[in-house]
Amino acid sequence: MAWFVLARALFITAVGYSAFQLHPLSAGEVPNVLFGFVLGVVIVLFELRLKNTSVTHMLGALLGGAIGLGAAKTIGAAMYWANLSDGKVVFLHSIILLSLPYLGLVLGARRGEWLEPANLVGLFRTAGPRKRYRILDTRSSSTGASPTSAKPVLSTAPW
């Protein structure tokens, strides 16, 4: 457990140092470092919440987010003719770029059970009824024959 605490502390320190070097806020150095530390703590808390999430749900979220990002990029590329100097068009473009990956991420995470191996195998099975063959054991028949003299018979009856 001490290893994970050390790794998380180093991560939070690295994010704080990165904020110190890159100045994401226009304020001084202290607010930037505090911003970096708070952001690092938020990321670690998010990681702790993901600890109980199944792998299939995380994979579903990853695939859904990637599909949403691809769709947003395609729509954005289709809007090449739009006037990017207009604030309304830029806002529409940013909403598309933010909402589609988010929706894909959420829907993919909710439907993560579709990626379980049993469900994936079920996609490739035929939808018809399964044939069941039964072997009739006639050794204990009512005719009084001994079990050693009776022979099993393969039935082709539909029941």
Image: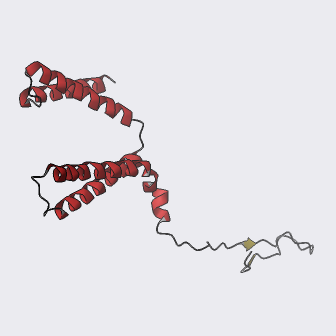
Of residues 39 and 8, the one drawn nearer to the viewer in this rendering: 39
Of residues 94 and 158, the one drawn nearer to the viewer in this rendering: 94
Quarter location, residue 24: top left
Q: Position of residue 143 (x, y in %)?
A: 92, 75
In the image, what residue occupies the spot 29% across and 23% down? 5
Q: Position of residue 82 (x, y in %)?
A: 14, 60
Q: Could you tell whether 140 is left or right of 119 in the image?
A: right
Quarter of the image with the N terminus in it: top left
Q: Position of residue 97 (x, y in %)?
A: 23, 51
- Determine whether 9 is above or below 57 in the image: above
- Determine whether 111 is above or below 158 in the image: above
In the image, what residue occupies the spot 35% across and 31% down? 48
Quarter of the image with the C terminus in it: bottom right
Q: Position of residue 34 (x, y in %)?
A: 17, 21
In the image, what residue occupies the spot 42% across and 55% down? 115
- Residue situated furthest bottom in the rendering: 156
In the image, what residue occupies the spot 7% across and 31% down? 22
